[in-house]
Image (spheres, rainbow, N blue to C red):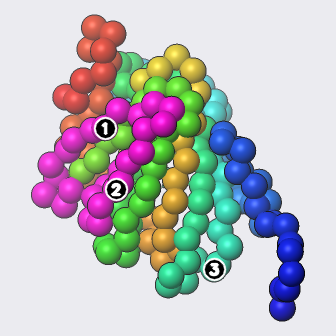
């Protein structure tokens, strides 16, 4: 049992997290097969390049009710054809689960889609804060020329449903149209 003054086992320095049990995950372009519209452009690219890295602190086992996880994602700048590098995107397995995202560095767009497949997007930048409601799929695109860094906090019983997005995709895509991001 802990007593008295102790030091937290975790740290958050604004653009990095560290501490006990830190988890890290890498997604290469090869891990993102099927999510980009321009299949020809995708086929011509090196599948080994890093699309993004995620670091997370997950103090309780996955599925724990009432627990919280904290993560930070480093999404590289790049495009596949006219489409910005983006995260896989997911609904939560637990449909009641919500999540906060916030922008730390760089420029991007949080793309959101409800179960009726309505799609909207919010600009991400250092200091932007985004609440992702229940039953809303979420994906982030890097629209800038530097690495986009964003942090997230989500319930430990949220889970990731990647299958729905893998099967049906998002109803709209964020493309570079004459140098500007547009939902198409
Ligand atoms: C955020 C959180 C994580 C998620 C990560 C990457 O850090 O939402 O749960 O894993 O972004 O997104 P994705 O899982 O869609 O690739
Ligand atoms: Zn989520």
Does the stretch in magenta take in 7? no
Say whether mark 2 is within 8 Å of ligand 2: yes
Please tell me in which quadrant of the rendered image residue 158 appears: bottom left
Q: Residue 107: percent from the left, percent from the top?
A: 46, 26
Q: Is residue 123 magenta?
A: yes
Give the residue at x 21% y 56%: 114
Residue tagged 1: 122
Upstream in sequence: badge 3 or badge 2: 3
- Side of 38 where 108 appears, left or right: right
Image coordinates for residue 145, horizontal then vertical, percent: 52, 17
Residue furthest to the front:
4
Q: Position of residue 62 (x, y in %)?
A: 58, 77
User: Which image quarter: residue 2?
Assistant: bottom right
Which residue is drawn at the image coordinates 67% and 62% (left, top)?
57
- The numbered mark, 2 or 1, whose residue comes first in the sequence reads 1
- For label 1, the SS is strand
User: Which marked residue is nearer to the observer: mark 3 or mark 1?
Assistant: 1
Residue to which mark 3 is pinned = 61
Query: In the rendered image, which residue does mark 2 sit on?
Result: 132
**Relative vertical location of residue 98 with respect to residue 88 in this rendering, above or below:** below
Q: How far from the left and from the top, in percent, is residue 68? A: 55, 71
- What residue span does the magenta drawing correspond to? 114-138
């Amino acid at each position: 049992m802990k007593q008295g003054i102790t030091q937290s086992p975790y740290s958050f320095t604004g653009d990095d997290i560290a501490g006990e049990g830190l988890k890290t995950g890498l997604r290469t372009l090869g891990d993102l097969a099927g999510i980009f519209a321009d299949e020809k452009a995708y086929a011509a690219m090196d599948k080994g390049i890093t699309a993004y890295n995620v670091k997370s602190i997950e103090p309780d086992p996955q599925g724990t009710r009432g627990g919280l996880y904290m993560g930070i994602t480093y999404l590289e700048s790049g495009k596949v054809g006219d489409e910005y590098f983006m995260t896989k995107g997911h609904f939560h397995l637990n449909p009641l689960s919500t999540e906060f995202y916030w922008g730390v560095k760089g420029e991007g767009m949080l793309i959101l889609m409800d179960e009726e497949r309505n799609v909207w997007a919010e600009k991400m930048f250092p200091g932007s804060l985004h609440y992702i409601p229940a039953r809303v799929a979420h994906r982030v695109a890097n629209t800038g020329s530097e690495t986009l860094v964003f942090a997230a906090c989500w319930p430990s019983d949220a889970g990731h449903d990647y299958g729905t997005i893998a099967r049906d995709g998002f109803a709209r895509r964020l493309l570079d149209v004459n140098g500007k991001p547009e939902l198409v």
